[in-house]
Amino acid sequence: MGRENPAEKALGLLRRRLCDPSFVFKPFSDSPDSNYSKLKFIISSSVTEACNNSILLLGPRGSGKIAVLELVISDLLLEFPDMISVIKLSGLLHSDDNCAFKEIARQLCVEHQLLFSKMASFDDNSQFMIAMLRECGLAHKTIIFVLDEFDLFSQGKQRLLYSLLDAMQSVSSQAVVIGVSCRLDADQLLEKRVRSRFSHRKLLFLPPNKEDMQRFRAVSNMDLVTGFLSLENFKTALSNVQRQPKLECIKVHMLTCGTDCSILELYILVCMKKLEIKEQNSYNFNSIMKEYKTVHDSFQTSDYYAQNVCLRAFEHLLQRELISFTDSRGNNQSIEFRPVKLLVSSHELHQGLKSYRSCPAILQKLMAG
């Protein structure tokens, strides 16, 4: 086996440092205004003062929410090794209440070396969680519940969130609920009974600036022969940073589809955006068709298509991943009734409409209004 190229070694070192949360976020630990310090203070106060807390970590993907949280938890586990238990759930996997309670029971059993029963009912797992909260509180041990993709837990009856936050009202419990979400309005999705039990603490995470992204991509393009970063590396990185994949997808989609087809799909995207503006949290194909008919009746547009044609356009948007289903539990449900969400921002959609010469003026007007 030959010797490792020094340039490859240098590249590996730079990548490890740029991707290591402790290297990126640890320098901010001394600042009381950093999210690391604020989050650590909230969790450590629950441990030392035997109180309950809840908090939301909000920000776009890639802004460091999970990285900072894991860094804080790892530091606290070193500081309080026998006083903290961590339970981790993901809305992508555990948004079903029954599944979530079962996973909590399983992780608690593993943590405390207890026998887990796969046959336990929903009520059994719920009561077990409440009993463990009480026992851990009496033993001065804090349970940290990390709910990733928090907004997905707010769908349905929210029994998990209510049971968890309601159990934390007891003086004998000692827990911290940490919700992590890309939606800045995640707390507004909560039912009144759940919201009243939530502390409404929020930490906002901002995405890395373009200069930081450019440095990272420049390192990825480093010349392995010389081991140096060239001006071309940074130029290539800058062009990659300035890309807008979804906007490019909309533009390519318009060029590759037939004119009528793309106009119909634009109507569907705009109708979905209007439903979001109306704060309609959950909608499906039928809801979109009602909005589409409302637009047609209001403006008497000539671009009106039969429902079966709209359904094909809707399925095409799903294939292009400009829209998606909000959960994976309704695989046996008809496509018209499954809730969907828009994966395109208002800015991207607006720019896509502007770049399309044959875009109906009514769509521009709807986006502007």
Image: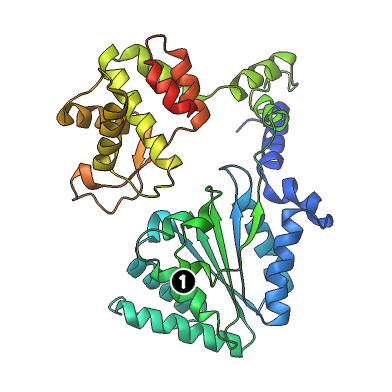
Q: Tell how many labels.
A: 1
Task: Bin the neighbour count of mark 1 within 10 Å (Cα to Cα): few under 14, some 14-19, many 20 and up.
Answer: few
Which quadrant of the rendered structure holds the N terminus?
Answer: top right
**Amino acid marked by disc 1:** Arg
Q: Position of residue 6 (x, y in %)?
A: 73, 29
Residue in the picture at 22% in, 29% down: 310
Which residue is tagged 1? 193
Indicate left or right for 85 with 304 as reference: right
Given the current orientation, which residue lies at the most extreme top position? Answer: 357
Residue in the picture at 72% in, 35% down: 14
Is residue 2 or residue 140 the one in the foreground?
A: 140
Is residue 208 or residue 301 the one in the foreground?
A: 301
| Quarter-of-image position of residue 63 | top right
In the depicted structure, whether residue 301 falls above or below residue 14: above
Q: Position of residue 103 (x, y in %)?
A: 40, 69
Residue in the picture at 73% in, 45% down: 24
In the depicted structure, whether residue 176 falls above or below residue 60: below
Q: Position of residue 338 (x, y in %)?
A: 26, 47
In the depicted structure, whether residue 233 falls above or below residue 86: above
Given the current orientation, which residue lies at the most extreme right position? Answer: 30
Residue in the picture at 70% in, 19% down: 234
| Quarter-of-image position of residue 211 | top right
Q: Secondary structure at mark 1?
A: helix
Q: Is residue 321 visible?
A: no
